[in-house]
Image: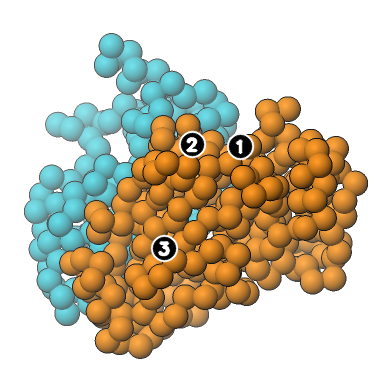
Chain colours: A cyan, B orange
Amino acid sequence: MTAVTMTVNGKTVSAEIEDRTLLVQFLRDELRLTGTHIGCDTSQCGACVVHVDGRAVKSCAMFALQADGADVTTVEGLAEDGRLHPVQEAFRKHHGLQCGFCTPGMIMTAVDMIRRKPALDRNTIRAELEGNICRCTGYQNIVDAIEDAAQQMAGAAS
Amino acid sequence: MITYPFAYTRAKSLDDAAALAAAEPGAKILAGGQTLIPTMKQRLAAPPRLIDISRLSELSFIRRDGDALLIGAATTHAQVAASAEVARAIPALAHLAGEIGDPAVRHMGTIGGSLANNDPAADYPAAALGLGATLKTTTRSLAADDFFTGMFSTALEDGEIVTGISFPLAEKAGYCKFPNPASRYAMVGVFVAMTKAGARVAVTGAGPCVFRVPQMEAALDKSFTPDSVAGIAVSADDLNSDLHGSAEYRAHLVTVMARRAVAAAIGA
């Protein structure tokens, strides 16, 4: 067992874990932050995307000890004062989900892409969603939601 | 728990990593882990120790050095793809890095890890071989022509760590790949370059290991145009054949991707 300490959604957390604990297992099993999902066992689906030190990564393709000392944000950390993040609000408004299983990863990927590329067109959004799989075939509304959120956030920032 | 048990150590320096690797046969270097960790999750690899070099700032850099572009081994695909320095020096390399995997993979995966792993369908080996790069390790420098020795195998010895790559600037360079529609790995990817030493053509995804195509290089030496390679077919004999495509199909794609890569290189 090895000690690990990181900041998750603004709070410092510490635990003793097995070295082989994946970051997603640490978040879900240790911290009970079950918003981050595990949708596959091959690191392809993107349901587990979180932000580590400001970058979107797959928490199933990273060991928790790699994030020792890091600043982690999960989907639970997006809303502020009970108000949904603009991307969450846009997914709700555009019905950017059916079953919702892929949604946490979609939202974390969307927040990351909007941060990196404020001027997003629909082709870019689809290319940026390369690593997030929706098995309900619901991409159309997901793209609508991200496009709208990007415009809302650009408007709010200017 | 999903992987076999192992011990994790975050290296404090490159020297520390080399000493740890030398002290424990079978220990694996962990850079971005975007291939190693999924492989461990499938229980196809069981290293007793992972030595994490991803946070070593001495391995993360992009800089121009005369007629070469130097990139540190722990530099991520996202950093290469977004680098103004790379875009100025070798735009084809930035383009290639921006097409690896997906955004989350590019935030973690590193150039040194990709080259050391030498996946038959990885993109970076094509750039290294196609540009005639030199790989720097903890003990020596190796030409790309001598580095890639076979499927998932390289000239690296036990405990030897890739520290950086030196890409000679090319007059022209282009990369084009046909991604597998599901995995997005290259079914075939071709990197072409007109270097100071002549034209080079490197193919990934098609065979068990990245390889050069001398007939295409000779044709491009005479005339660096898409038409020069359009009529040159490679033999399907040693190419990969699987559920995604036959060896004959991959051989066909080599010519098509080579033609498109040359077109990209000259801006046609």
Q: Quickly name the residue at label 2.
A: B89
**Given the image, what chain letter belongs to the residue carrying mark 1?**
B
Residue ID at (47%, 24%): A120
Q: Nearer the viewer, residue A143 or A53?
A: A53
Task: Give the amino acid type for the residue marked by disc 3 in the picture.
Answer: Lys
Residue ID at (82%, 47%): B219
Q: Residues within 10 Å of mark 2 (few under 14, many from 20)?
A: many
Q: CA distance from mark 1 to mark 2?
A: 10 Å
Task: Give the amino acid type for the residue marked by disc 1 in the picture.
Answer: Glu
Task: Give the amino acid type for the residue marked by disc 2 in the picture.
Answer: Ala
Q: Quickly name the residue at label 1.
A: B171
Q: Which is closer to the viewer, label 1 or label 2?
A: 1
- Which picture quadrant has residue B83? top left
Left or right: B131, with B221 as reference point:
left
Left or right: B246, with B231 as reference point:
left
Task: Give me the disc on residue B136.
Answer: 3
- Which picture quadrant has residue B204? bottom right
Whether tag 1 and tag 2 are in contact, CB under 8 A, the answer is no
Residue ID at (63%, 53%): B130
Left or right: B147, with B208 as reference point:
left
The image shows residue B215 at horizontal and vertical percentages of: 82, 55
Q: Using the image, determine if residue A78 lies above or below residue B110.
A: above
Could you tell which of marks 3 and 1 lies nearer the N-terminus? Answer: 3
Q: Are labels 2 and 3 assigned to the same chain?
A: yes
